Amino acid sequence: MLKKITQSEYLNLISGIILLITSGYESFAEPSIGAHHGILIFGIIQILRAIPEIVHGLKELEDAKEAKKLKQKINNIRKNEKLEF
């Protein structure tokens, strides 16, 4: 369960956005170089790592929906063929 939570792409995306917002605010409010700049970069990296995984998951969902529709069409054709004989 813990492994599933820590490897969640949505959690990585949300944490990256939070890091980006909070460190971005500090970077603009306090222009001196500090740890918040490293956290800003880390937040960007977290977001960039999460996006491809989410896009891949969305493509798989779309493919599954298309496969389900195709399967339903095939079943309907088979039912129609049985009714004709």
Image (cartoon, grey):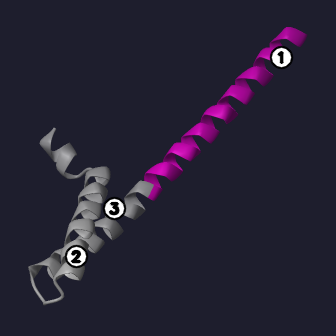
Residue found at the far bottom of this picture: 32
- Disc nearer the start of the sequence (1/2): 2
Which corner quadrant holds the C terminus? top right
> Per the image, is 72 magenta?
yes
Quadrant of residue 30 within the rendered picture = bottom left
Q: Amino acid at mark 1?
A: Asn
Q: Amino acid at mark 3?
A: Ala
As drawn, the label of residue 40 is 2
Quadrant of residue 45 within the rendered picture = bottom left
Q: Specify the segment rendered in magenta.
A: 55-84
The percent coordinates of residue 44 (x first, y second) are 29, 73
Disc 1 on helix, strand or loop?
helix
| Residue at 13%, 42% in the rendered image | 2
Residue found at the far left of this picture: 35
Between 65 and 13, the one lying in front of the other is 13
Residue position for label 1: 80
> Per the image, is 61 magenta?
yes
Contact between labelled residues 1 and 3, with CB atoms less than 8 Å apart = no
Q: Amino acid at mark 2?
A: Leu
Contact between labelled residues 2 and 1, with CB atoms less than 8 Å apart = no
As drawn, the label of residue 24 is none
- Disc nearer the start of the sequence (3/2): 2
- Magenta stretch, main secondary structure, is helix
Between 32 and 36, the one lying in front of the other is 32
Gap in Å between the C-alphas at discs 1 and 2? 60 Å
Disc 2 on helix, strand or loop?
helix
Residue position for label 3: 50
| Residue at 32%, 66% in the rendered image | 47
